[in-house]
Image: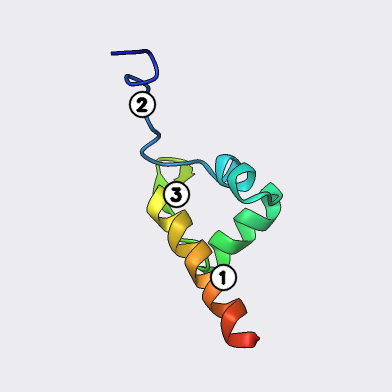
Amino acid sequence: MTARDTMLKPRWYSPAEVAILLGYGLSKVKMKIATGELRSIKDGKYRRILPEWVDEYIRDQVARSEEAA
């Protein structure tokens, strides 16, 4: 087993991490959360986003783009 095999994958992301993943600014991610376009949960004073919710957001964006074309 190598070190790579034992690396943990994040169970959820912060808005800042999602901004990096999507190539967005932090304020845009926060706006998407506020409008409900991007799902999140409140964990204490922090917002958290599950990886599958990021995938869901991307699928929704692709579907909207294809519908508009």
Do the numbered discs 2 and 1 sit on residues whose CB atoms are within 8 Å? no
Q: CA distance from mark 2 to mark 1?
A: 28 Å
- Tell me which amino acid carries mark 3: Ile
Count of picture labels: 3
Upstream in sequence: badge 1 or badge 3: 3
Q: CA distance from mark 2 to mark 3?
A: 17 Å
Q: Identify the residue under disc 2.
A: 8
Q: Identify the residue under disc 3.
A: 49
Quadrant in which residue 2 is drawn: top left
Chosen colour scheme: rainbow
The residue located at (42%, 57%) in the rendering is 53
- Give x and y (percent) for residue 30: 61, 55
Quadrant in which residue 32 is drawn: bottom right
* Secondary structure beneath label 2: loop
Q: Is residue 41 above or below residue 5?
A: below
Q: CA distance from mark 1 to mark 3?
A: 17 Å
Upstream in sequence: badge 2 or badge 1: 2
- Name, please, the residue furthest toward the top: 2
Q: Identify the residue under disc 1.
A: 61
- Tell me which amino acid carries mark 1: Gln
- Give x and y (percent) for residue 47: 48, 46
Frontmost residue, 54 versus 31: 54
